Amino acid sequence: MDSLADLPSGPFLPATAYGSARVAEAERRLYANRFWHPLAGISQLPPGSCLAVSLLGQPILLSHPLDGPPRAFLNRCPHRGVALQDPAEGTVACRRLVCPYHGWTYGLEGTLLAGAREADFLEPFERSAWPLAPLACQTLGSLIWVALAPGPIPLAEQLDLVLEEAGPWLEQPRLLLASANQELACNWKIAHDNTLDDYHVAIAHPTTLHREQGPVRHYRYRLSRCATLLATPHAAGGEFLTFGLAPWTHLLCWPDGRLALISFLPLDPGHCQMVVWLLGKAESAADTQAWLKQLQAFLAEDQALVEAAQIGYASGLVPGPPHRLEQRILQQQALYRDLLGKALLDPASCGDNRTGAS
Ligand code: FES
Ligand SMILES: [Fe+2]
């Protein structure tokens, strides 16, 4: 266990950081753009397929060429901006992409293979000048990770504790077995803080998560700049690993090889989208619904708390003193503060455009 002297220091972020439109805009530029985002399971994108998704309002197209690794692009035809594929279509088996507007055709590696009526452009037409706009893309842990802007923090640094504690084990291929989305009436940081909060588990989740994590005296912590870990002995042997990851993701690892990824994506300052993905080996598929139900039981307990906290924060709360079991919150908030800049989070400068819970 950490000594108190080693713990990250408070105070918590001011309440104004949870309701300001100005902060929300800055988060996008200075925080979200610095990280990699898991956008799909590798099992969703076999070679010779494409999948349209969106992240923070950006249209993104994932493709998997037959002879290379998965790629990511803006889902936006360079001619007049139309999407090449609709997210509602899910995974589409294809060898090439044909724009539905004027018929330009692209390979899955993003090059323009043919324009339409090429001889009649008003200026000389060079296919090579019109590729799809690429985004940085990597695969790790059975997931496809994408960065929205140049110069992200390296993925190996973002996931350093995961790689150190679960690296080789993480590389075993897993399928995306189930997913669930739900809107929460709270700022994403309230939901993220709550999932990093080990102080509330025994009180708020006595028959759910607390049973999985066991007594507080056995908690093992590790903290790095971008990640936090709570490891607890598991009844089935081994450890249950709970990683809190920048920017807003949580990775739960069971000793039997199952993984759950829980993300809280910002919508507006008073709302976020909770996304839950369950990954496991094919043999875990039969029990997926029971597993999802088990997770949703403690997430429902949390929903009531985070939505109530949103109302408290919006009423001008000055957050109380941090507890040792809240150290993972402080660690992630230190990174957030560092990337956003202290000046922006000063209550005097971010108190504009506050929105309450609705
Ligand atoms: S917008 Fe795609 S071909 Fe014109
Ligand atoms: Fe909780």
Image: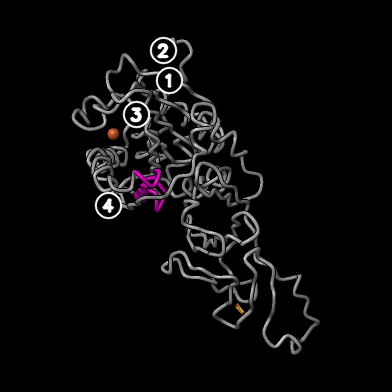
Q: Are marks 2 and 4 in contact (CB under 8 Å)?
A: no
Is 322 placed left or right of 48 in the picture?
left
| Quadrant placement of the N terminus | top left
Marks 3 and 2: CB-CB under 8 Å?
no
Q: Amino acid at mark 3?
A: Asp
Closer to the observer: label 3 or label 4?
A: 3
State whether label 3 is within 8 Å of ligand 2: yes
Q: Position of residue 177 (x, y in %)?
A: 37, 50
Distance from disc 1 to disc 2, alpha carbons, whole Å, reads 7 Å
Q: Earlier in the sequence, mark 4 or mark 1?
A: 1
Report the coloring of the rendering: one colour
Q: Quadrant of ligand 2?
A: top left
| Disc 3 from disc 4: Cα separation | 24 Å
Q: Is 257 on the left or on the right of 336, as rendered?
A: left
Choose the circle earlier in sequence order: 3 or 4: 3
Residue that mark 2 sits on? 1
Q: Contact, CB < 8 Å: mark 1 with mark 2? A: yes
Within 10 Å of the Cα at label 4, are there few (<14), some (14-19), or many (20+) other Cα atoms? few
Residues under labels 1 and 3: Cα distance? Answer: 12 Å
**Nearer the N terminus, badge 3 or badge 2?**
2
| Magenta extent | 264-283
The secondary structure that dominates the magenta segment is strand
Within 10 Å of the Cα at label 1, are there few (<14), some (14-19), or many (20+) other Cα atoms?
Answer: some
Residue named by callout 4 = 358
Q: Measured along the vertical axis of the image, is residue 299 above or below residue 322?
A: below
Q: Quadrant of residue 157?
A: top right
Q: Amino acid at mark 1?
A: Tyr
Residue for badge 3: 197
Residue 219 visible in image: yes
Q: Of callouts 1 and 2, which one flags the residue occurring earlier in the amino acid sequence? A: 2
The answer, for residue 311, to whether it is visible in the render is: no
